[in-house]
Amino acid sequence: MPAAVFGRYACRVSTPFLLEGAALLTSGKPRRIAHLDMDAFFASVELLRHPQLEGLPVVIGGARRIAREALLAGHGERAMHSIPVAEFPRLKDYVGRGVITTATYAARQFGVGSAMGMMKAARLCPQAIVLPVDFDEIRRFSKLFKSIIAELAPQIQDRGIDEVYVDFTDVPGGQRDGGRALARLIQRAIFEKTGLTCSIGVAPNKLLAKMASEFDKPNGISIVQESDVQSLIWPLNVRKINGIGPRAGEKLAALGIRTIGELAAQERQFLIGHFGKASGAWMLDAAWGRDASPVATHSEPVSMSRETTFERDLHAVHDKAELGAIFTRLCAQVAADLQRKGYAAKTIGIKLRYDDFRTATRDLTVPAYTSDAQTIRNIAGQCLKRVPLDQRLRLLGVRASTLATAEKLSVFEQIKPIVQTGRAPPATKTIAFYSLF
DNA sequence: TCTGGGGTCCTTTTCCTT
DNA sequence: TCTGAAGGAAAAGGACCC
């Protein structure tokens, strides 16, 4: 505790000073945060299983219509490597909805890329081989590479299926060569045990580490120091900042701000005026390479949801039975997810997307937590009544939020009987316990 | 032209209470 | 009793990320 360090003066100094002093005393070494990004993860995992597809245009996506089982019918798992290329399905034969999850570099040369509609991709590169996403396999590799990193550097923050932040600061050897030595060690271990490559950026914080990891792709390592911000970061487009997407990028461009350096030159109040208090201030800090956020090794989920886009647009009246069945299934899936992960929710919501792609959401917070499928279905049903249903729908989703863990709820369950067995407990007491969570 | 699914976080609006 | 301000919580929408 800083209080002990500062001895009798501890009670007289302000909290910020204590924190600053503690940081100086404990570290003495520069903060080194790494961002690790697997190279074309989905496609790379797929190529490991189908090496004969190496160098060919391949897109991954459309899982629902291209079943792996059908693909492998008559071949079996052991023959996977030897399926003739000619037998793989082609994009030109693809019918229906969906987007490309990822594409190999050979396919990208035709202009095909992530998040592109399958039908558009089929026009650009009809001969491309199309494979379904195998999420079980992707998840297996995700766990594997994360566990390999954890053995070498345990302070890890999950950043999705194929990315992590790693705190090198206090790892033995983590400071050597600006972090390059440890990065190389991790890169080599991942390749040896999975056959996959990754790119790593090391910098004083997460924001810069994320940008650094893009400097040398694939299979690269790059180090960015605080003093490099003006020379390496400022010339880049604002869109390179993690958190500035298409909308903010467009808005900035309209204000004549294209590079990160131009963003850094703005007045804080000017940015706050255009982007709001939190976003405006954050943007300016980001442009200066400032980011104090820690590598969060643990986080609690905020919500759990299931949604599905229909094969064809459905109408609430005309396709009532079909829609009802899907709705019930989504509720059951959310309930199962909550139960499997040990959570219950107090807010249940729905999401729907109309045929013109407009989205509507409704949600409802109830007094008691639940993870029961029927209860969720009832609450979601109430939400559904509050939304216009005269137009065809393309998507329906169910969401659970305001979550509590089963442990917290069991504490509540233990408290409740005590309150209720007490002499004439007023109803307000029970309500007070509810509000604890 | 067509636009998945699972998340987090922020902003704005609305409603309720004081 | 009516009105308005202020503030918080919930709801709705949307941007962004992988």
Image: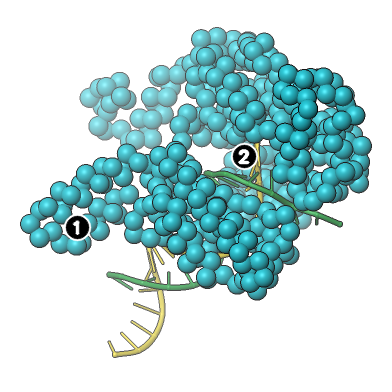
Chain colours: A cyan, B green, C yellow
Where residue A265 sits in the image (x, y, percent)?
68, 44
Mark 1 or mark 2, which is nearer the start of the sequence? 2
Near-viewer residue (A133 or A34): A133
How many marks on residues? Answer: 2
Distance CA(mark 2)–CA(mark 1): 47 Å
Residue in the image at 45% along x and 62% along y: A378
Residue occupying image coordinates x 80% and y 48%: A117
Depth check, front residue: A261 or A137: A137
Residue at mark 2: chain: A
| In the image: residue A118, left or right of residue A377 | right
Q: Residue at x 69, y 60 (%)?
A: A394
Q: In which quarter of the image is residue A430?
A: bottom left
Q: In which quarter of the image is the N terminus of chain A?
A: top left
Q: Residue A406 carries which label?
A: none
Q: What element carries label 1?
A: helix
Where residue A4 appears, as percent x and y from the top left, is: 27, 22
Q: Can residue A406 be seen in the rendering of this structure?
A: yes
In x, y percent, where is residue A132? Answer: 74, 36
Q: Going 91% across and 46% down the picture, which residue do you hit? A: A123
Contact? badges 2 and 1 (CB < 8 Å): no
Labels 2 and 1 within one chain? yes
Query: Which residue bears the numbered disc 2?
Result: A286
Up the image or down, A395 lies above or below A391; here it is above
Amino acid type at circle 2 is Ala
Front residue of this view, candidates A167 and A429? A429
Mark seen at residue A429: 1
Left or right: A47, with A269 as reference point:
right
Q: Answer few, some or many: residues within 10 Å of disc 1's Cα (few below 14, many 20 plus, some between 14 and 19).
A: few
Q: Is residue A319 above or below residue A335?
A: below
Q: Can residue A278 be seen in this view?
A: no
